[in-house]
Amino acid sequence: METIDYNDPFYILKFVGNFFKSIYETYIADTITPFLPVLEVVSITVSLLFFAGTVFCVIKIREIQSKEYKKYKAIDIEKQAISERDTQWEIVMKHMDSDNPAEWKLAIIEADSILDDIMKDLGYDGDNLGERLKSVNKGEHVSIEYAWEAHKVRNAIAHEGTFSLNRREARRIVGLYEKSFKGLGYL
C-alpha cells in the first residue's frame, strides 16, 4: 500500500480512492469478471434505449412547439382586416348574383352597414350613418356624394315597404357603394 503524505492537500481524496480500490480488488473484481460480457451488452442496450427515448422526446417536443407556434403566432391585423373586408364585400356581391329582388335589397342594406362601419372607423361622429355623412367636409372625400346617393336608396328600401328595385338599379346602387368604398380606402 502506498504511504500517504499528510502535507499533500489531496491526501483525503487519495486515501478514499485507495480504500475503494482495495475493496474492488478484494471483493468485487473476482465476482464481476465472469459477467463482464453480459454487463457490456446490457449497458449498451440500456444506453441505446435511453438514446432512442431522448430522440423520441425531442421529436415530440418539436411537434408540440410547431403546433403552439401555429396556434399562438402573432396575427397580422392588417391582413385580417383586409380579409374581413373582402369577405363582407363578397357577401354583398353574392346577394347581387341572385335573381331574387329581395337579395338585391339585402345587398344594398349590407353595403350600407359596411359604409357605416367605415365611417365609424374613420372617426366621424353621429348617432347614425346619415349624421356621420353630414359631418364630412365636401372637399375631404369626393366619394361621399356616391355614398349619400346610395344611402338614400337604402333608406327608401328600409322605410318604404313597397319599394321596387330592378336588377339594373340595384347594380348601379351597389356600384355607388363600391366607388365610395374605393374612395375611402376600403376596397
Image (spheres, rainbow, N blue to C red):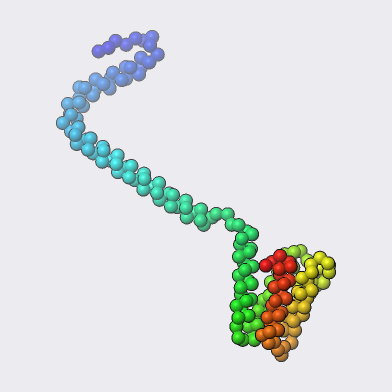
**Numbered disc total:** 0
The residue under the point 63% across, 80% down is 96
The residue under the point 23% across, 39% down is 42
Which residue occupies the extreme bottom position in the image?
A: 162
Q: Considering depth in this image, is 7 or 149 the residue closer to the camera?
A: 149
Query: Eyeballing the image, is 89 above or below 19?
Result: below
Query: Eyeballing the image, is 5 above or below 28?
Result: above
The residue under the point 32% across, 42% down is 50
Find residue 55 and report its horizontal and vertical position in percent: 36, 45
The residue under the point 34% across, 9% down is 5
Q: Quadrant of the C terminus?
A: bottom right
Would residue 49 be found to the left or right of residue 119 on screen? left
Find residue 91 and report its horizontal and vertical position in percent: 61, 75
Which residue occupies the extreme left position in the image?
A: 34
The part of the image, by quadrant, that contains residue 169 is bottom right
The part of the image, by quadrant, that contains residue 173 is bottom right
Would residue 38 be found to the left or right of residue 152 on screen? left
The part of the image, by quadrant, that contains residue 155 is bottom right
Find residue 45 and report its horizontal and vertical position in percent: 26, 41
Residue 51 makes an appearance in the image? yes
Residue 161 makes an appearance in the image? no
Q: Quadrant of the N terminus?
A: top left
Would residue 6 be found to the left or right of residue 185 on screen? left
Query: Eyeballing the image, is 145 above or below 36?
Result: below
Query: Eyeballing the image, is 71 above or below 93?
Result: above
Find residue 101 and report its horizontal and vertical position in percent: 64, 86
